[in-house]
Image (cartoon, helix red, strand yellow):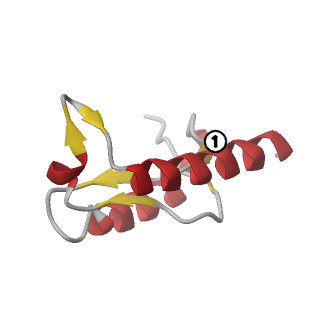
């Protein structure tokens, strides 16, 4: 029986950007840490950008939409940088 390795992963060299949210103060940073380890072992391309961490999400949502202007601005900035990094790769 053949054993799959990281070199068989369909995620090799795929760009990754972490986005988490939480009702708490940490915004999912512990989950991002675990995801980083897992995806690195699958040989994903971890882009050298800040992660998107949205804390206290309950106060930033209205009518099922993210409405917090500073958070939206931050997300837009990081996503633009991520897309630019992917385009250069």
Q: Which residue does the numbered mark 1 point to in the structure image?
A: 14
Q: Residue visible at 85% across and 46% down?
A: 88
Q: Residue visible at 41% across and 54% down?
A: 71
Q: Quadrant of residue 31?
A: bottom left
Q: Position of residue 23 (x, y in %)?
A: 14, 57
Q: How many marks?
A: 1
Compared across the picture, whether 32 is left or right of 74 comes to: left
**Picture layout, residue 43 above or below residue 49:** above
Q: Specify the quadrant that holds the N terminus.
A: top left
Which residue ends up furthest to the front in the rendered image? Answer: 69
Q: Position of residue 67 (x, y in %)?
A: 32, 41
Callout 1: 10 Å neighbours few (<14), some, many (20+)?
some
Q: Position of residue 75 (x, y in %)?
A: 50, 50
Q: Position of residue 6 (x, y in %)?
A: 55, 49
Q: Nearer the viewer, residue 8 or 16?
A: 16
Compared across the picture, whether 48 is left or right of 68 comes to: right
């Amino acid at each position: 029986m053949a054993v799959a390795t990281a070199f068989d992963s369909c995620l090799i060299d795929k760009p990754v950007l972490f986005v988490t949210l939480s009702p708490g103060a940490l915004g999912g940073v512990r989950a991002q840490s675990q995801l980083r380890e897992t995806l690195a072992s699958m040989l994903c391309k971890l882009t050298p950008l800040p992660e998107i961490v949205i804390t206290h999400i309950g106060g930033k949502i209205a009518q099922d939409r993210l409405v917090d202007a500073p958070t939206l601005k931050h997300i837009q900035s990081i996503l633009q940088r991520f897309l630019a990094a992917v385009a250069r790769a």
